[in-house]
Amino acid sequence: MVDGRVSATARTILRLSSVVAGLLGWHYLAVVVVKDGGVLASPLEVLARAYEMTVVTGELYPHLFASSMIFFYGFGLSLIVAVPLGFVLASTRLAWDYANPWITAAYTAPGVAFAPILLFWFGIGTGSKVAIVFLACSFPVLLNVYHGMRVVNREYVELARCYRLTRWALFRHILLPASLPFILAGVRLAVGRGLTGVAVAEWFGASEGLGYLIFFAGQTLNVPTLFVGVAVFTGLGIAGFEIVRQVEKYATPWLAGGPWK
Amino acid sequence: MKPRPAFTRGAVSVVAGVAMWEICARALLENELLIPPPTSVARTFWSLAASGELNRHFVATATEFALGFGVACIVGVALGYLMGRYRWVDEIMEPWVAVLSSVPVVTLVPLIIVWFGIGMFAKVVVVFKVTLVAVTVNTSAGIKSVDRVWLELARSMRMSSWHTTWKIRLPAALPFIMTGMRLGVGRALLGVVLAELIASEAGLGYLLRESSEMWDSPKLFATIVLLVAIGLANFSLIRRVEQPMAPWRRTAEWSMDA
């Protein structure tokens, strides 16, 4: 067993028993040790609360809807702006050199730092939230588009020159497909960052949304709701990743099983 | 030899950008609150630094970060090693690591505050969580990817398992461990600032919150400038450290999942 030769059944059993033991331990901790609903709720309570929020009262859906709107506006806008901008920066050396310090600074700084300024500028409505998500999503996409274009094999470009491809054909048939894996990796990163952005945005002066739900539940010590909110957020993140991964499979089939899996 | 044009252009761009900012803020905007000119940001920065206020908050954030990061690296490498080495540990830990790594840390911050209060310890926990996941996952991947040939060589030379660990497995996993740390640094910085922003008594996130609540935008901008500087310093430091730590591996200039 020590040497890495564990049969498939044994592995499933180990995994399952680890999950079951963990949940039991959590339940025990909540019910017997802590005994304070304002600090830790047992998994059963969390499940009951999730059922209540999704089926009985349906109070989860407005929050889910509000957050999704913000996410899709910010995310969509960032794709519309960052992808073309990345191409432009990659194709003109001069523009990149001038933009580089600003982009690096904005990308490496912890993203929340800019949230208060955006609130100053756009108020506490939808505008500032979309702006926060937009900013969070843009830089990973922008930088991945840029670097994806830069690492395109020179020989392909030379070949295209030999065939006298037009600039557009060069872009459409060589540069774009070659940099597509990078672009999609950037999009995948942007999904995660965007969701973080949604949560941050909804903490300041929001009255609905999943971020607000979590924040408010934390302040009122409503731990089951807090857990449900965290779980929904996690589910959205996983779903987003999975969607981008499917797009990757479809759009870049030659990489199936490659380093990005 | 001419100086590197990229560097010159970058410097020109920064200087020109700051000058433009100053001119626009002074000439066009009547209200300094929206975009304070760089000179007043610099003045505020200087007075904050001179009064020791900036220092106090910086030290608070740095301490939280260092504690959480340091402990998480040690625990993460040990846990990742066990996961990479023993299949059964891997199977037992895997579901939990997967859950932890897919929960966005920002959503955990309110829960961590409920559990650990608004003091320093809660922020240490935030940093710990983020770094632990990144380091554990990468260490385990690194240990698993050790070339079997080296292990066979070690066996044929009758190296003790202790020796194999120190001389072969860990060095081979080092680039992966460094990647985990690099990922951890960025996310942990975000996490700690965010946690301070939500509830705290000190730290750069606290400074952000305080200045934005008091509509003190020069102070807000001064804090942001400091955070940007920390981000940049991290970025260049890691670039410099990562390569010499694993000179046998060619690090790409850019990794997609930075």
Image: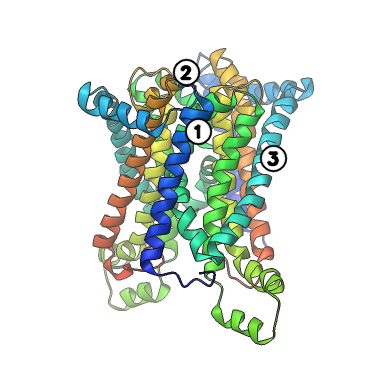
Q: Are marks 2 and 3 in contact (CB under 8 Å)?
A: no
Q: Residues within 10 Å of mark 3 (few under 14, many from 20)?
A: some
* Viewer-side residue, B179 vs B169: B169
Q: Is residue B33 left or right of residue B78?
A: left
Q: Are marks 2 and 1 in contact (CB under 8 Å)?
A: no
Screen quadrant of the N terminus of chain B = bottom right
Q: Residues within 10 Å of mark 1 (few under 14, many from 20)?
A: some
From this view, report whether residue A94 is shown above or below residue B53: below
Check residue A29 in the rendering and tell me which mark sits there, or answer none.
1
Check residue A54 in the rendering and tell me which mark sits there, or answer none.
none
Name the residue at 65% across, 44% down. B69
The picture places residue A246, in percent across and down from the top left corner, at: 26, 56
Check residue B67 in the rendering and tell me which mark sits there, or answer none.
3
- Residue B184 visible somewhere in the drawing: yes
Q: Residue furthest bottom?
A: B156
Name the residue at 57% across, 36% down. B126
Name the residue at 46% across, 37% down. A26
The amino acid beneath tag 3 is Leu
Mark earlier in primary sequence (2, 1)? 1
Separation of residues labelled 2 and 1 (CA atoms)? 22 Å
* Viewer-side residue, A119 vs A204: A204
Separation of residues labelled 2 and 3 (CA atoms)? 26 Å
Front tag of 2 and 1: 1
Chain letter for mark 3, please. Answer: B
Check residue A219 in the rendering and tell me which mark sits there, or answer none.
2
From this view, report whether residue A4 is shown above or below residue B77: below
- Residues at marks 2 and 3 on the same chain: no
Separation of residues labelled 3 and 1 (CA atoms)? 27 Å
Quadrant of res A260? bottom left
Chain letter for mark 2, please. Answer: A
The amino acid beneath tag 1 is Leu
Front tag of 3 and 1: 1
